[in-house]
Amino acid sequence: MPSPTRPASKPTGLECRMAVLGADVRLTPHRREVFDTLAASTDHPTALDIFTRIKDRSPGISLATVYNCLDHLTSAGLIKQVHLERGQSRYCANLQEHVHFHCETCGKVIDAHPAADFDPARFWILPKGTKVTRMDIAIHGTCEACANK
Amino acid sequence: MPSPTRPASKPTGLECRMAVLGADVRLTPHRREVFDTLAASTDHPTALDIFTRIKDRSPGISLATVYNCLDHLTSAGLIKQVHLERGQSRYCANLQEHVHFHCETCGKVIDAHPAADFDPARFWILPKGTKVTRMDIAIHGTCEACANK
DNA sequence: GTGAATGCAAAACCTTTGCAACTGG
DNA sequence: CCAGTTGCAAAGGTTTTGCATTCAC
């Protein structure tokens, strides 16, 4: 008899990702929804964007809960926070090594992946004793559509 | 008689930098102060930090003016905005190619310079037609002092 | 059962705006 | 002279907090 204790809701990428990463966060419907919404987005939404998208489905959710979920998912390493502009943060469920291309004209954010396998930290002289946990690389410019206007 | 029209304040690095870069911003005492304060700082201050430091000398200045000056200096390319954390922006007068190391324990920010001359954009596959204007690279981790605690 | 997560609303914080007065070029 | 800059105060937007209630484990 296969796993009789599994809850009624269908399993999401979140459980799978938690297992792979060995992350330990308490699994609640809202955290699942925040994660699923982010994972289904290609546009690096802000907390308010995520809140708005979820509210259509689950009217009960509050913005504070979205922030709470995003913070927990971020510190568990299940999603990433992205800082591109003044005033607001964006989020990203893509954990592959990548950089963010940010169009300064239309605001669009596009993931760009490394051309070859290489160790970026090798290219900069960091102070002795420094421990690196992650790198955020943002490339600002103009996307093709805006460049052709 | 040497330059009788020169104002009482001593010339700063700002005029020099404007000349080198061909930047055109109206030169006011506050813009000079904001630039000088930032140029004299090694800690990548926030707008409020800069406001506080200037207020000791020039009690008349307002926070809105500091933001205004920072925005003008940034769009003229005379300083850079740095986004490392949620909620607040930092500023930086170092225009050399460099990355920011951010200690997640004590919040300290350290400039790190490239080990060799290389074109970072070459390492990522950007969408066709993309025009790059600048790159922001943030390396997050733990500084030596915090690692030894 | 129990500690953790949530909703709500208010607060705190960062940043922008409007307008009258002033000033650099 | 006059467009652009400033101070002030208020508004706007984002993020955090406190507390009673609810829920996952």
Image: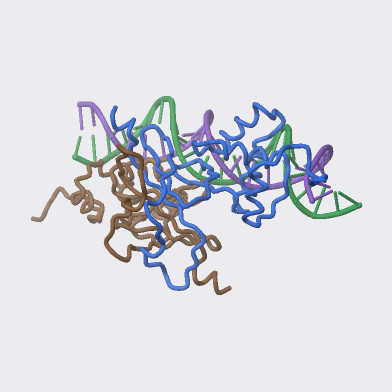
Chain colours: A blue, B brown, C green, D purple
Residue at x 32% of width, y 66% of height: B115
Residue shown at 57% from the left, 36% from the top: A40
Residue A37 occupies quadrant = top right
- Number of dots carrying numbers: 0
At x 40%, y 41%, the residue is A102
Relative to B111, is A69 on the left or the right? right
Give how far across and how far down residue B30 sits, in percent. 33, 46
Would you say A107 lies left or right of D18 here? Answer: left
Q: Is residue C7 above or below residue B134?
A: above
Residue displayed at 29% across by 32% down: A147
Depth order, front residue of B70/A70? A70
In this picture, is A29 found above or below B7? Answer: above
Find residue B44 and report its horizontal and vertical position in percent.
42, 56
Residue A138 to residue C22: above or below = below
Of the pair A46 and B110, the residue shown nearer to us: A46
Could you say which quadrant of the image residue A66 lies in?
Answer: top right
Q: Residue furthest front?
A: A1
> Residue B24's spot in the image, x, y percent?
22, 42
Q: Quadrant of the C terminus of chain A?
A: top left
Task: State the image coordinates of residue B139 (x, y, percent, origin top left).
Answer: 45, 58
Left or right, A42 with respect to B128, comes to right
